Image: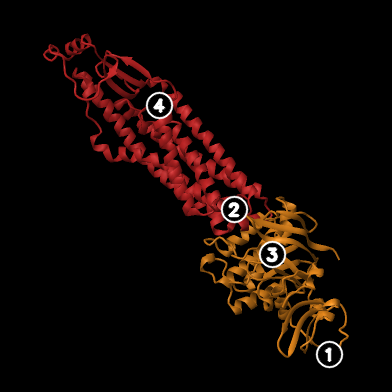
Amino acid sequence: MTWLIWRQHRMQSAAASVMLAAFAILLAITGVTMANDYHNALSSCSQRGVDCSGLTLFRGDGAIIDLVNLTVAVPLLIGVFWGATSIGREYDSGTNVLAWTQSVSRRRWLAAKIATLLVTSLLAGTALSVMVTWWSKTLNLYHGNRFDPLEFDIQGLSPVAYTLFAAALGLLAGVAWRRVLPAIATTVGGFVAVRLSIENWVRPHYETAVTVLDPTVGKGTPNGAWSFNTDLIYKGQVVDGPVRVPTGCAGSGSRDAMTSCLQQHGFHFRSTFQPASRYWPFQWIEAGIFVGISAVLVAVAVYLVLRRDA
Amino acid sequence: MSAALATYGLGRRFGSKWAVQDCTLSIPEGRVCGLVGANGAGKTTLLRMLAGLSTPTTGDLEVCGRRPCDDVAFLSDVGFLAQEIPLHKRWNAEDHLRFGAAMNPRWDDDVARERLTALQIPLQQPIRTLSGGQRAQVALALCLGKRPRVLLLDEPVAALDPLARREFLSSLATAVADGDLTVVLSSHLVTDLERICDYLVVVAASRTMLAADIDDVLASHRLLTSARRDASVIERDHVVLQRETTQRQTDLWVRLNGPVHDPAWQVNELSLEDIVLAYLGSQHPLEQKQQLGTVAS
């Protein structure tokens, strides 16, 4: 079995290693440069006694930032190129029959194939996540938004769990369809559907969102939090559409004075968010959900391969 | 003589359609058995069940004394060559030999390698660049290098041109000439099988029609011809597989259970192909003798 696994996977492993290495070099160079730029800018603005919040940095690094954001699609690529082809291509070309009529049991063959798929996917996903998480440190400090969906999806534990999920989904699709092309289509559709559903409808509710009325700091949401919305409330109702500012408040002068004037007239701001401290619990929950789904998908694939005819 | 393969009331259903039904047969050890039947008669399903690739719906079967299962002892006794001749298209023949060595404890590298060398098959060329005949030879070498006790070949020559077909069959004949390997070879062409087989199984409409030694088959089947006359006397003693009645003449394809006493019948020998065609044309399997009396023309 070892020989077969090596012979079947040596090309894709080599290709993946080269791509990951190239990406690592790119990120190492740009990551160090960005960190230096940021710290130089911070120290120079504090020396000059200027407010450092208005720094404009990394404008020229748009391409590399986009490239890193695009790694959100890497789990899907692994699901398509490794997962869907893993056993799907064997069925498609009939080589599963070739393998199952040698002197190695189907169970052992299956165990080796699945273990190879999951371990390589896990390694690739972890390597990528470690790189992106390290590289994003500067941007996280600068923007303070690692809880926002796109950043959350490419850093920490979640991309590793997504990779596992994509690989398991591709595996099952290949087993169920016994053909590569429909398996790829199913993997893409299934991955996007599950990822978006959980991101939009489940993830915001891992814990009850915090609601703050009339936050003292101007914008309301603490730094690093995952902000959902900031509403204007009047007499317990969310104000939607144009607001008629009460006479008197319009000419308050300063912004703070206007806010307190509005509050006296019954207007309030309400902001809803997940605080930054919940970042890691959310990462663990998200990863746990996707690992759980992956386990179910793999179990179904195993059942189908062992129970159905060749 | 012990049976290398035996099936008892074996059946396999896909949805509501039976691919193989009520199949009982046994093939003695060391024989080269031809499995004949029309397309869709259930040959492939039968072979796949024997190889452990398909699970029977009903009945039982034994290959080398074991029921097909997912363990090394069974798998290493059985060689199987599927109809599509599945090989890794991007690998070369050398890779396949290494594959065979890595996947089979009883692997005989010399046997496989010498075959391919003798046939002048390039070992370093990707499989997809080889001809159909060469691919079939690579697949056969893989099967033989495994040193199975039973070799199951599902229409291995169906896709080959006449020359490659002949080469494949003669190289198979050489390979199985000595040794106690039992071979089951399916085809829908009797001429393919006549060359190398000494045992014949005929399946039609998912049922087994005949399973016997080819010499016995040839000896016991005759074409009876006479001026138009009633066949009921013949039907009482023998099995009429098929009949043709014209205004002047009656032809009966018959499996004899003894000599034909009535001198009015002219007794002619039948070729293997004629016998097989008579079975494929008839509706009734060997076992259901009592029904044979009702064969309609």
Nearer to the camera, B151 or A247: A247
Q: Residue A194, image x and y in percent?
A: 45, 38
Chain of the residue displaying label 4:
A
Q: Is residue A96 above or below residue A243?
A: below
Tags 3 and 4 on a common chain: no
Q: Which residue is mark 3?
A: B206
SS state under label 3: loop
Q: CA distance from mark 2 to mark 3?
A: 37 Å
Tell me how the rendering is colored: by chain
Q: CA distance from mark 1 to mark 3?
A: 37 Å
Chain of the residue displaying label 1:
B
Mark 4 or 2: the one toward you: 4
Mark 1–mark 2 CB contact (< 8 Å): no
Amino acid type indicated by mark 2: Leu
Whether residue A178 sits left or right of residue A50 in the image: it is right
SS state under label 4: helix
Q: Which label was assigned to residue A204?
A: 4
For residue B6, what is the image quadrant? bottom right
Q: Colour of chain B?
A: orange
Q: Residue A308, image x and y in percent?
A: 63, 50
Nearer to the camera, B50 or A71: B50
Q: Which residue is mark 2?
A: A4
Tags 1 and 2 on a common chain: no
Mark 1 or 2: the one toward you: 1
